[in-house]
Image (cartoon, rainbow, N blue to C red):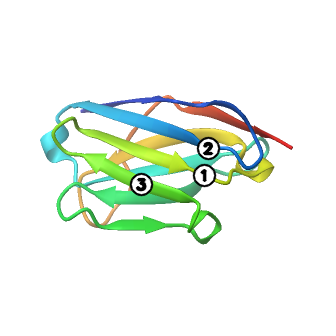
């Protein structure tokens, strides 16, 4: 099992910034990659981006490219989501997740942190 705890959410005005953190514990040696997802009210959960622990390969969904940055601290087993130029449509509960392989799905999830962007 991998336990994940997100932090850093809050209320921010449009154009502002927030940094989310996700601390992993437990069987972290089994984790291949960490992902960030978000779910807005009435919408399905969507992929935001991901980073691999080895090699630091990073991917983003198109809507956040150039505004969001994912980074990781392997020693602390913590990943970050720096969100700049926030828009009201970025309002959602943000989740981090862990997967153990290149393929397959993300098996472990955090409890989520609310991000609200006011216009």
Q: Is residue 16 above or below residue 61?
A: above
Seen in the image, is 85 located left or right of residue 9?
Answer: right
Residue that mark 3 sits on? 70
Label located before the other in sequence (3 or 1): 3
Q: Is residue 110 above or below residue 119?
A: above
Residue that mark 1 sits on? 84
Q: Nearer the viewer, residue 22 or 99?
A: 22
Label 3's element? strand
Q: Nearer the viewer, residue 98 or 17?
A: 17
Where is residue 59, by image quadrant? bottom left
What is the number of the mark on residue 17?
2
Distance from disc 2 to disc 1, alpha carbons, whole Å, reads: 4 Å
Instruction: Look at 77% across and 41% down and name the residue there.
Output: 41
Q: Residues within 10 Å of mark 1 (few under 14, many from 20)?
A: some
Label located before the other in sequence (3 or 2): 2
Question: Measured from the top left, where is residue 46 in percent x and y?
Answer: 60, 56
Distance from disc 3 to disc 1, alpha carbons, whole Å, reads: 12 Å
Q: Residue furthest right?
A: 119
Instruction: Look at 79% across and 48% down and name the residue there.
Output: 88
Question: Measured from the top left, where is residue 44 in percent x and y?
Answer: 68, 51
Seen in the image, is 30 located left or right of residue 113?
Answer: left
Question: Measured from the top left, where is residue 74 in percent x and y?
Answer: 19, 45
Instruction: Look at 47% across and 47% down and name the residue there.
Output: 81
**Between tags 3 and 2, which lies in front?**
2
Question: Measured from the top left, where is residue 110 in percent x and y?
Answer: 44, 33
Q: Residues within 10 Å of mark 3 (few under 14, many from 20)?
A: many
Distance from disc 3 to disc 2, alpha carbons, whole Å, reads: 14 Å
Where is residue 42, by image quadrant? top right
Label 1's element? loop
Instruction: Look at 68% across and 44% down and name the residue there.
Output: 16
C-beta proximity under 8 Å, tags 2 and 1: yes
């Amino acid at each position: 099992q991998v336990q994940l705890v997100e932090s850093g959410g809050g209320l921010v005005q449009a154009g502002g910034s927030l940094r989310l953190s996700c601390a992993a514990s437990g069987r972290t040696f089994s984790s291949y990659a960490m992902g960030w997802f978000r779910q807005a009210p009435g919408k399905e959960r969507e992929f935001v981006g991901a980073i691999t622990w080895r090699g630091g390969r990073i991917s983003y969904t198109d809507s956040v490219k150039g505004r969001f940055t994912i980074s990781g601290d392997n020693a602390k087993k913590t990943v970050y989501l720096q969100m700049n130029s926030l828009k009201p449509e970025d309002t959602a509960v943000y989740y981090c997740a862990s997967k153990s392989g290149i393929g397959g799905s993300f098996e472990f999830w955090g409890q989520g942190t609310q991000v609200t962007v006011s216009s």
